[in-house]
Structure formats: C-alpha cells, structure tokens
Image (tube, coloured by chain):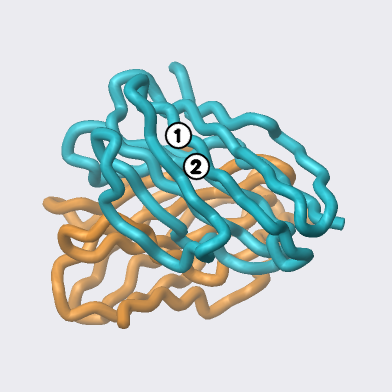
Chain colours: A cyan, B orange
Amino acid sequence: AAGVIQSPRHLIKEKRETATLKCYPIPRHDTVYWYQQGPGQDPQFLISFYEKMQSDKGSIPDRFSAQQFSDYHSELNMSSLELGDSALYFCASSGRGRETQYFGPGTRLLVL
Amino acid sequence: AQSVTQLDSQVPVFEEAPVELRCNYSSSVSVYLFWYVQYPNQGLQLLLKYLSGSTLVKGINGFEAEFNKSQTSFHLRKPSVHISDTAEYCCAVKIGGGQKLVFGQGTRLTINP
C-alpha cells in the first residue's frame, strides 16, 4: 500500500539559510500534520492542514511556515535556520474521520 | 494540559520472554490511544490503536494493548519477543476532537539473545 512520502530524506544547511521540506500524503488523505523530533526527544506537533486550510497549530516557530496545495501535498518552509532546528521532521496524513495518523519516513535536517 | 507518560525509558528482555511496555495518560475527556514503533533511521509505524469498543486491541507483529479507563493506562504487551522487535516504542494520545498527537517519551526495547 502507498505510504506517506517525504522529500528530501536528508538535508544539510548552514545557519541563517532556508529549507523546504515536502510531504505527499497517502492517496485520498486530505489532512496532513507536521511534527519535529529533536535528538532524544519525542515528536512535537507543529501544524496541520485539512482541505488546504490550517486546522491546528502547535509549537511552530514564526520562522517556519507551511501550506497545503490543491493536490494535498504540503510544504514546510523554514527560514533563518538555527542550530536548534536540527531534528527529524515527520509528516503524517489521515483520511476521512481523521482518527489515525500515518507517518512518513521523515526528513533529517542538520544545520551547521 | 494533557500528557503521556512512558515510565520506562529502556526495557531489556531476553528473546522469547514476555514484555510489557507501560503508558499512562492524563485527560478528563475521551481519548484515542496509539502505539507506534520506530526502527532505527525509519519513520513511525502504527502498531495498534484504541478508538472505541473492546478495550483489548490487537496489532501487528503479535503485539496487543489494553485500555484501562480507571487507571488511565494503555500498556503494550507481547507474550514472546523476537530479536527483530528491537526498536523504540512510542505511546501517543489524541484528545477528543483535537488534531494533534501527544507523544510519550518513548521506550527503547532491547532484545538480548
């Protein structure tokens, strides 16, 4: 079965640079979620979108923005990167009912 | 605020032994409960979930969990573990109609031969 696709899988950036992470949900899923998992930490919710509208917001820094497009894929844009942004970024998607979230493999971001 | 507590950060067990990974949550409203497994350098894979109905839920790879509302727990169990079960196990809660999952700190399960 098709799963959530994230790209790139690995990304290395310098401080103050920008990064764009992409997420392609499972087909027919209309909701996407972004989580950040720092080293040795549990995943923290950043933001979610339902039918291209922001549906919930967590601890997402103002330097980050995200959107969901008409084909339901989502992009997380990160500007003025800091060392502390180094983490594993997960995208998840859910379908009708939205009870269960299915996670992608994650994008590992390293900020130098 | 809602929270999820996984009491054991690491659990070492011998192969073919039973295991229980503990998860407690705090919430006064209805919850959905999940266990995810994270293998090294991989994403979170859904093991099992409790949404409603029978409090004993069965998942993949021989795992099961029991929802105990009075004790606000959702412990994960497997009667006989295998080397391939070595991974990080994450308990998560979705509160009422909310969107986000709140995760526990994770439990690293190590299987010794």
Residue beneath label 1, please?
A74
Query: Which residue is found at the position 42% from the left and 71% from the top?
Result: B23
Residue beneath label 2, please?
A91
Dot label at residue B4? none
Residue B110 picture location, percent across and down: 72, 59
**Quadrant of image for the N terminus of chain A:** top left
Q: Secondary structure at mark 2?
A: strand
Q: Is residue A31 left or right of residue B92?
A: left
**Quadrant of image for the C terminus of chain A:** bottom right
- Are there few (<14), some (14-19), or many (20+) residues within 10 Å of tag 2? many
Query: Which residue is found at the position 51% from the left and 66% from the top?
Result: B21
Q: Nearer the viewer, residue B51 or A40?
A: A40
Query: Which residue is found at the position 46% from the left and 45% from the top?
Result: A66
Q: Secondary structure at mark 1?
A: strand
Chain of the residue under label 1: A
Marks 1 and 2 close (CB-CB < 8 Å): yes
Query: Which residue is found at the position 38% from the left and 35% from the top?
Result: A68
Residue type at mark 1: give it.
Answer: Ser
Q: Nearer the viewer, residue A41 or B84?
A: A41
Above or below: residue A83 compared with residue A9: below
Residue A52 picture location, percent across and down: 29, 35
Q: Quadrant of residue A6?
A: top right
Residue type at mark 2: give it.
Answer: Cys
Q: Nearer the viewer, residue B105 or B16?
A: B105
